Amino acid sequence: GVMGVMGNKGGVSIRLQFYDSTLCFICTHLAAHRENIVGRNADFANVFNKTSFEIGQDAVQEVIRLGSMSQWANSANAVGAADHDLVFWFGDLNYRVDESIPTERVLELSKANMLEELIEHDQLNIERAAGRVFRDFEEGLFDFKPTYKYQPGTDLYEERPDKKLRAPAWCDRILWLAQDPGHVAQLNYVRSELNISDHKPVMSTFLVTVKDVILTKRDSVYEEVMKMLDTYENNSLPMVSLDRINLDFGEVRYDQRVTLPIVITNTGQVVAQFRLHPKVDESALCKPWLTVSPTYGMLIPGEQTEIELTITIDNSTAHKLNTSREILEDILILRLENGRDYYISVTGKYARSCFGMSVNELVLYTAPIREVPLDPILRAEKYDLNSRAAMCVPKEMWRIVDAIYERGLDERDLFTAVGDPDEVYQIRECLDTGAAFENFSVHSMAEVLTSFLSNMSSPIVPVSLFPTLDIDAQNIQMFTRKFLEDMLPVPYNVFIYIISFFREVLTHRQRNRLSPAKVARILCNCLVWSPQGNAEESGNSSNQRRGNMQQLMLHFLETNSI
């Protein structure tokens, strides 16, 4: 931060109109630290969503006359980043090389200019490919060495004994987003060899095509179009047909995206402009688990287009479905300009999953969770929810831990290598249905375990148990004792079970290459997350408490405190 008082992460943006094209430039400094990928992704989303320019109704109308439809759909006096013809995003984005490659190896490859393996494990490339950040943005290929971290005033990577050893990374990047990708071409993408900082700045040259609207021709075309529209409107009102208005998505699973299309055809004699419209007393077009694209459009007579509706079950939605606070049912309103409304019914059935549930509920059921009814009345008829827990820990967690124990605690890079996505999906299905595991890889099993613990509806270790004071050798025993005493019974059982398992994992550290510090960080990420953060704490205080918690985890792993 600035003098240890103010934060130095965020972004600044500026927009301009060059001839008849709109351009936006955004410079950001995103969250630091190699392991903080989620923080960087969140910083990007925050800057992107909050970038807004109040340009006034007259300016918006002029943008519309220059050919933009997005402002017409938004009906606003402001424009966001994505509303521009071209967006350039650059700065210290702080994405590093994935932690699966040790720091020493990254240094060795960087100095030798052997970049292929490092580029393949670049966090920004991985996150963009997964669609978690900078969606639809483009970045050119680069062949220069990592731009961070150098000894200031030199061209040497920082390896001095008195300094913290950091893995070199391409922190400094330039990306762009174009409404028409053919209107921008990157001519080069290089770095500077200035050495006044611990970063090497990057730079790029672009060839951009800008619009230059000929006003007389525009007015002429406008008049011709208006005459044509008047003719159509004199004949009849706009009319469209939908190939279906009832969409049944069938069974939808956790962390799954299911898409169904609706075909809209203009069956009238005039241009039909349509858009989705919120229901009465609501601002959103649909429920959070449903997305629609596009939400507006225009069809000339005889033309047709598709609207895609997608259901996505994330952790928040799964929790609401499991607690009967949500159902997969919604009604969308498709409104024709100067025409009628069409009502589209959306239904689906959630295939219940142990992901997104709480450990307190999971221990109540011995049957596979897929067989437990979502309806609270049917669930109460089938199970005595007031009885004592049927198990000490969730059976799903026991199954996956047992499988990892049996299949390979000696596996190299255990809990750090990424599993196979298809296998991860199949393992989740086995946990939810009670089916036997096939010959899945240990890495896929490990990824499912960390995902299971990370996606509880409430964390195993809530934020209320975070140590409030600095931990040292004199008070750590007191903190560990109080920590265990304050835990509720089922989370306590889960915590003891997981700690005991990872202790066993660490006895194989010579082969699986895990260390107590790395396991402590994994446990903090899985067990100690706090939903949506704690708004009452400053960022520094929150980081300090998480650091204290990591020390506690390390203490549990290395001593007989339990």
Image (cartoon, rainbow, N blue to C red):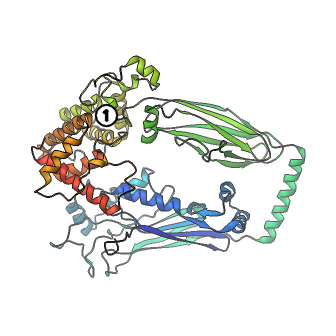
Camera-side residue of 550 and 222: 550
Q: Is residue 349 left or right of residue 232?
A: left
Local packing at callout 1 (Cα closer than 10 Å; few below 14, some 14-19, many 20+) is many
Q: Is residue 490 above or below residue 160?
A: above
| Residue position for label 1 | 359
Horizontal and vertical percent for residue 262? Answer: 64, 37
The three-letter amino acid code for the residue at tag 1 is Val
Residue 515 makes an appearance in the image: no
Nearest the viewer among 129 and 310 is 310
Side (left or right) of 475 relative to 463: left
Q: Quadrant of the N terminus?
A: bottom left
- Nearest the camera: 369 or 178? 369
Q: Position of residue 154 (x, y in %)?
A: 26, 80
Which residue sits furthest top?
Answer: 381
Q: Residue at x 46, y 21 (%)?
A: 377
Answer with the quarter of the image where residue 67 lies.
bottom right
Q: Nearer the viewer, residue 123 or 28?
A: 28
Using the rendered image of the protein, determine whether residue 25 is visible from the camera's viewpoint: yes
Seen at 10% across and 46% down, the residue is 559
Residue 481 vertical placement versus 38 (above, below): above
Q: How many marks?
A: 1
SS for tag 1?
helix
Placement of the C terminus among the 4 image quadrants? top left
Residue at (86, 48) in percent of width and height: 233
Q: Position of residue 225 (x, y in %)?
A: 82, 57
**Residue 49 position within the rendered picture, expressed as x and y whole percent measured from the top left:** 52, 59
Q: Is residue 477 above or below residue 9?
A: above
